[in-house]
Amino acid sequence: MAATSPAPSLGRLLLTGAAGGLGRELRPRLRPRCALLRVSDIAPMAAAGPGEEVMEAALEDRAAVHALLEGMDAVVHLGGISTEQPFDAVLQANIVGTYNLYEAARRHGARRIVFASSNHVTGFYRQDEVIDATMPVRPDGYYGLSKAFGENLSRFYFDRYGIETVCLRIGSSFPEPKDRRMLATWLSYDDLERLVVASLTVPVAGHSIVYGMSDNQATWWDNTPARHLGFRPQDSSEPFRAAREAAQPTLDRDDPAVLYQGGAFVRMGPFE
């Protein structure tokens, strides 16, 4: 069941990365709220339904991205590579592609972007620390580095051109937590929807950074600097705790994936 009422309020919205896991989840939740929902990816997507347009586009293809932004009021940008990969692949999709998106938004008059950043922007903070979005970034790989670039790029486009962005440092958004780490980082699909809708509808977003997490009992992130967005998570990982702890009764305290917030990402690569 969707977490919010279906009253149209989002105007003409572009959803990139619509064929991905979160894109497939958000597409039917956002469509009833939009005057038009345009969805895009390089992977196959379901055919357009009422009030939808489907456009295939590679983010590194500048002309294709400019076509995507024509007539759009706002963007939910989930597109790009979402895992740790060799730098050249991340460069094209996540760095060149994000620049193309922001430049197209500037030229075509889109005024707000919800940018899917990642908790891996700060993955090299320890799990015994609580941090907020005002603290320096500490990316745990090329993927996290590309998302830090996107956050800085969005700041520049806000300061110079007035394009508002809410950067979502998404934790772990799945039907349920998969392991003990996700007891701290889990974001339910309903809370993901609440977060995206809040980011699109808050009267003044400015340039904001918020950690995408549910109301988990234990967490490493303080969202106080983003309270102006009005995001109030309603779900929690706590009902899954007993099962996840039983599946992982012990943890290796010398394992960097246990020590650092980024989990397994901190020990991926190099990619020779």
Image (cartoon, rainbow, N blue to C red):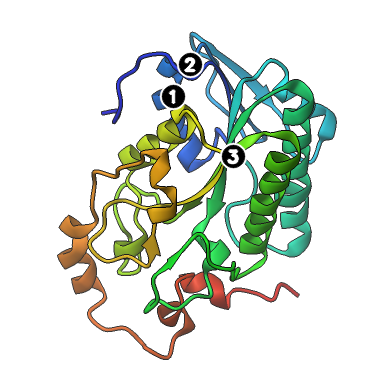
Image quadrant holding the C terminus, namely bottom right
Closer to us: 196 or 266: 196
Q: Which residue is mark 3?
A: 165
Image quadrant holding the N terminus, namely top left
Asked if the residue under mark 2 is in contact with the one under mark 1, i.e. CB atoms within 8 Å, the reply is: yes
Residue that sits furthest to the right in the current view: 63
Q: Residue at x 38, y 35 (%)?
A: 193
Q: Residues within 10 Å of mark 2 (few under 14, many from 20)?
A: many
Amino acid carrying mark 2 in the image? Cys
Q: Which residue is mark 1?
A: 30
Res. 51 visible in picture = yes
Asked if the residue under mark 1 is in contact with the one under mark 3, i.e. CB atoms within 8 Å, the reply is: no
Q: Which residue is mark 2?
A: 34
Q: Earlier in the sequence, mark 3 or mark 1?
A: 1
For residue 207, which quarter of the picture?
Answer: top right
Label 2 vs label 3: CA separation?
A: 19 Å
Q: Residue at x 37, y 67 (%)?
A: 220
